[in-house]
Image (cartoon, rainbow, N blue to C red):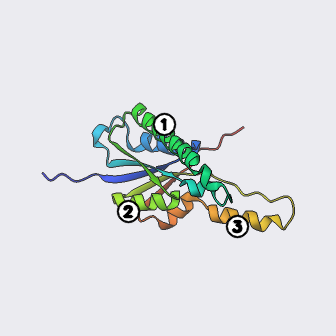
Amino acid sequence: MATSEKQVMVVGIDDSEHSTYALEWTLDHFFTPSLGSNSLFKLVVVYAKPSASSAVGLAGPGAAEILPFVESDLKKIAARVLAKAEEICTNKSVSDVIFEVVEGDARNVLCEAVDKHHASILVVGSHDIQFKPLKGSREAQPQLLYTLAVIGSVSDYCAHHAHCTVMIVKRPKIKH
């Protein structure tokens, strides 16, 4: 009897509650304890760590002096995010997981992880940012819109550029 290799599912994480929810939801629905090692997927959890220079941006003179401190903080954040993801997986009895930290923009890092691992599914959380009418001067609005366009949505970018199925997991809205 020939054994077939499991499909790969990549889950993108960051330090947000949306990301945590997406990972937990994925584990609950695709890696239940009743399946044990019979899950259809091999799990790869990926964190995109920004570079120190991109985090500092164009800070001007003296920026180079703070880069080592920023890099140290970014590494601590990455370690904390991975530790939380590992804890979630352990608590849900999912042990066959690959955890990766890759430096770069999350949109590119996740699409590249899909290609690298030949993933069938990419799971990302949704920050569900809602745009509201801006108050203030009209002169400030184009700058803000430009900033939002440059930042963009990781989930939207991945939905259009990843070479696999993309599942965007949204947290349920809390009713008051």
Please tell me which residue lies in front, 170 or 106: 106
Q: Give the side of residue 172 with respect to residue 33, left or right.
A: right
- Identity of the residue furthest to the left in this view: 1
Q: Nearer the viewer, residue 15 or 71?
A: 71
Q: Viewed as shown, does residue 126 lie left or right of 79?
A: right
**Labels 1 and 3: the sequence-earlier one:** 1
Q: CA distance from mark 3 to mark 2?
A: 30 Å
Q: Give the CA separation, mark 1 to mark 3.
A: 33 Å
Q: Which residue is mark 3?
A: 146
SS of the residue under disc 2: helix
Give the percent coordinates (x, y) of residue 166. 46, 58
* Secondary structure found at label 3: helix
Q: Residues within 10 Å of mark 3 (few under 14, many from 20)?
A: few
- Where is the C terminus found, in terms of image quarters? top right
The three-letter amino acid code for the residue at tag 2 is Asp
Question: What numbered label is drawn on residue 115?
Answer: 2
Which residue lies at the image location 58% right of the left edge and 44% below the top edge? 16
